[in-house]
Amino acid sequence: MMKFRKVCAFLLIVFTTLSCKKSREATDLTREPLIPIPVSIEATESVFEITRSTEIYVDDGDVALNKIGEYLAARLRPATGFPLKVIDSKKQADKGISLTLDGADETLGEEGYELTITEDQMKLTAPNYAGIFRGVQTIRQLLRYHIESTTTQKGPWEISTGTIQDYPTYPVRSAMLDVARHFFTVEEVKQYIDLIAEYKMNTLHLHLTDDQGWRIEIKSWPNLTVHGGSTQVKGGKGGFYSQEDYKEIVQYASDRYITVIPEIDMPGHTNAALASYPELNCNDNPPELYTGTEVGFSSLCVDKDITYKFVEDVVREVASLTPGSYFHLGGDESHTTKKNDFIKFIDRSQEIVLKYGKTPIGWEEISQSKLQKNTVVQFWSDAEHARNAIKQGAKLIMSPANKAYLDMSYDSTTTLGQHWAAYIEVDSAYMWDPASIVPGISQDNILGIEAPLWSETLMTMRDLEYMAFPRILGHAEVGWSPASARDWDSYKRRLAQHGPRLEARGINFYKSKLVSWAD
Ligand code: NGO
């Protein structure tokens, strides 16, 4: 009898232990706080667990996949403390984490992916590497926020089971960084790249030149950086990227499937260049370096031949360092350039950009000139310019200043930023639809969105973070997720869960009172 009881007790323990695995608190993949919200999620209400013995399998001999596997492992190793070996696998793996292009659904497109999670396996498939990289960001967000810690945390590392199918609404989802008003180092730009990558953004627009500073080395015009890069707003010491530095940024971005768009702002916003080379001025008289924050007072001398030699040298050198297909030629606020001169300048500059194999982009004012076939126009405030652009068949990047500008203060108590366009609280930065901003312009006319971070008032990385976070998460979702899936209440709930995640990464973000931040 005693023996029978012991056996029963033993069986009970075994049974409870086994059934525990299945009956762990019900999980629901559809309720995970993902940002941007995926196109479709189906839940199967069980869990997959990353353990000490989990391995990451990638297609055999696929160097790019192996690199993404290592990227994922590097993100997960510190907090889990697990080895997470990346393994080239000859046949499709049926356990652990698998990253594969094999059998992917081509209709997912350039950046789409499918993530299938069962109790035994988490399988990420995509027709292209960019899709795998975006899907990896989803995996990171499916784990508890402790995964962002740089020191070992207590597990378990569970992920709800089910299937996610996902792809972006707009092909361009960009963040702009103004490194001209205040200079930011290569390391700081890399940090920003890492942050935007996590939210599936795919473009970094670098505003490399402005009145207050020229930040990219041009070997044929060295004084641009020697003199023109030597200061910044309020007279700090400024700085610039050597061509090697710039290449390093471009490579770092490209490793994260992010394209860099360089901007050389012309013909206005050029005081730093005008101060560096007398011959670029109509009167050959160079102005002093400028450390204020006014806009619209400078212009290259549009009638001089040397101006176009300058433009061509700069475009040639920067284009040769830039693998991405776009070159941003600025074109905003040339208030001291006569309209005809402006048009003449933009016409010639577009041709120069095309000559060096790049597609021109310019701020909305360039739609006053004759746009080349593929020239892209960036809307920021004037609906008429945007409509002129689409009349000419151009596509738009939408950066409405009163929604997408990250340098706008949150409210009247924000000590950083400006508010000429609006105060932009976290809800306002989320509740906008690129296709409804300008009457007469629809989704078909739009290539994507961009959230620009102008740096007149921003001096440090902490300043940048405070203005960008959490608003940039909202812009990332506006660009990625279908309008039908976007909803402030759902977003607010998900964003609340990102608070601890941002904190774990040490990001100085604005804790808006509109959000009930999770502890
Ligand atoms: C404007 C201006 C920039 C300023 C920014 C500040 C554009 C396209 N040009 O936007 O030079 O830095 O506002 O918000």
Image (spheres, grey):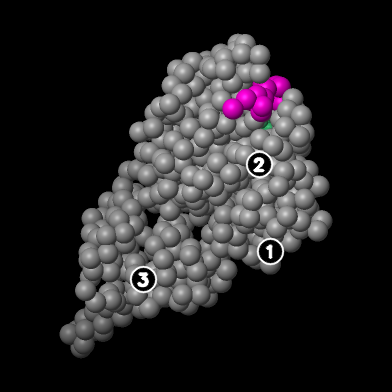
Nearer-the-camera pick, 454 or 250: 250
Q: Which mark is residue 347?
A: 2
Q: Which mark is residue 513?
A: none
Q: Residue at x 43, y 26 (%)?
A: 220
Nearer-the-camera pick, 152 or 8: 152
**Which residue does the numbered mark 3 point to in the structure image?**
101
Which one is earlier in the sequence, the residue at label 3 or at label 2? Answer: 3
User: Measured along the vertical axis of the image, is residue 164 above or below residue 452?
Assistant: below
Please indicate, yes or no, whether residue 238 appears anywhere in the rendered image: no
Q: Residue at x 55, y 32 (%)?
A: 311
Q: CA distance from mark 3 to mark 1?
A: 29 Å
Horizontal arrangement in the rendering, residue 304 relative to residue 423 (left or right): left
Which element is circle 1 on?
helix
Q: Amino acid at mark 1?
A: Asp
Please indicate, yes or no, whether residue 19 appears anywhere in the rendered image: yes
Q: In this picture, which residue range is highlighted in magenta? A: 293-305
Q: Amino acid at mark 3?
A: Leu
Question: Residue 435: image x %, image y %?
Answer: 72, 58
Examine the image and state in which quarter residue 305 appears.
top right
Horizontal arrangement in the rendering, residue 154 relative to residue 61 (left or right): right
Which one is earlier in the sequence, the residue at label 3 or at label 1? Answer: 3
Q: CA distance from mark 2 to mark 1?
A: 25 Å
Which one is earlier in the sequence, the residue at label 2 or at label 1? Answer: 2
**Which residue does the numbered mark 1 point to in the structure image?**
444
Q: Is mark 1 within 8 Å of ligand 1?
A: no
Considering the image in quadrants, where does the N terminus appear? bottom left
Q: Residue at x 31, y 59 (%)?
A: 64
Nearer-the-camera pick, 14 or 469: 469
Q: Are marks 3 and 2 in contact (CB under 8 Å)?
A: no
Magenta stretch, main secondary structure, is: loop
Which element is circle 2 on?
helix
